Image: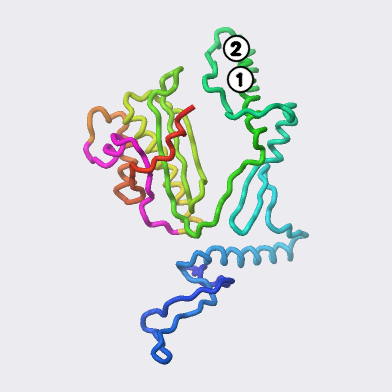
Amino acid sequence: MDIKTFLYGDLNEIVYMEQPPGYVAQVEKQRMVCKLKKTIYGLKQSPRACDIVGIEEAKTYLLKHFITKDLGRPRYCLGIEIAHSKHGVFLSQRKYSCDLLQEAGLLDTKPVDTPMDSSPDFWNDDDLISPLLLAWLISLWIKRSVHWEAALRILKYIKASPGKGLFFKRHGHVKIEVYSDADYVGSKDDRKSTSGYYNYVGGNLVTWRSKKQITVATSSAETGFRAMAHTTSEILWLKNLLKELGFTYDDPIPMHCDNQAAIHIASNPIFYERTKHIEVDCHFVREAIMSQKICTHSSEQRADFLPKP
């Protein structure tokens, strides 16, 4: 069953359309245009207009069968404060942050500029702790006093601006843009590398991640390519999510990466002996590139800070 959902929404804005071929009408040799009364495919208002109709129908159905109350637009959900404006939506956790500070007794503390010490001493002292005591401490996430101090420092950092949040601005498009980066053997403890990426949808930051890789890399090309593989998985998930929400995105999604060796491996169909151990990641990224789901760029790298401590 094919339902033309986008053809039933009511337009609140004035939108004109050129006359389609075969239906051209002229008045006194002046070419006329069509004034739209309903939404059509290709309009950025179409998904929103259809949602309004569906929401009203759902409300009407619920009011008939249940005792309900329409509270309007959400203002607070799962600890997140939601503020609407004509320019977009602002999300913050001011109340939740203040509650944490009050529970920790840090409402009057002096804030700090960074969430973490530049060189924390998290050395491993498992041999000094009995297994039973270690299990109890791990359950509390406090292994040594330095961990407790690190947790308090995060709260002191939040104290500087508890109302800071994310602003999602209306840009009128759903363009996806992705940035990926990785360091090389950055961890002083086990020399594992850290990958990072963040993704824009419609000009707004929606997903991001910075995580240590599970294996030790033998080259910077390997760390960069593993980061590209993780980022590709996120890109495909975002693309499928938008498709389920009714947004078709056929253009290749640009992934910005400044690791030239990793880009060369992704673009070259030849496998080398030194890249056999990452062959699965190679096939995965190359398949996404060959099917034009993603494309790689080396310019304008904005994710350089993600792998850094």
* Residue 289 appears left or right of 73: left
Circles 1 and 2, Cβ within 8 Å, touching? The answer is no
**Mark 2 burial class by Cα count in 10 Å: few <14, some 14-19, many 20+:** few
Residue 105: give x, y in percent of width and height.
75, 26
Q: How is the image coloured?
A: rainbow
Indicate which label's residue lies in the foreground, 1 or 2: 1
Residue 243: give x, y in percent of width and height.
46, 56
Question: Depth check: 118 or 183 in front?
Answer: 118
Question: How many marks on residues?
Answer: 2
Q: CA distance from mark 1 to mark 2?
A: 18 Å
Residue carrying label 1 = 147
The residue that appears at 53% across and 14% down in the rendered structure is 123
Q: Which residues are magenta?
A: 248-270
Residue 63 sits in which quadrant? bottom right
Question: Depth check: 207 or 127 in front?
Answer: 207
Magenta run includes residue 132? no
Residue carrying label 2 = 131
The residue that appears at 57% across and 66% down in the rendered structure is 49
Residue ranking furthest to the top: 128
The residue that appears at 69% across and 51% down in the rendered structure is 75
The residue that appears at 35% across and 25% down in the rendered structure is 217
* Residue 115 appears left or right of 261: right
Above-or-below relation of 48 to 154: below
SS for callout 2: helix
The amino acid on which the numbered mark 2 sits, given as a three-letter code, is Pro
Residue 89: give x, y in percent of width and height.
61, 52
The amino acid on which the numbered mark 1 sits, given as a three-letter code, is His
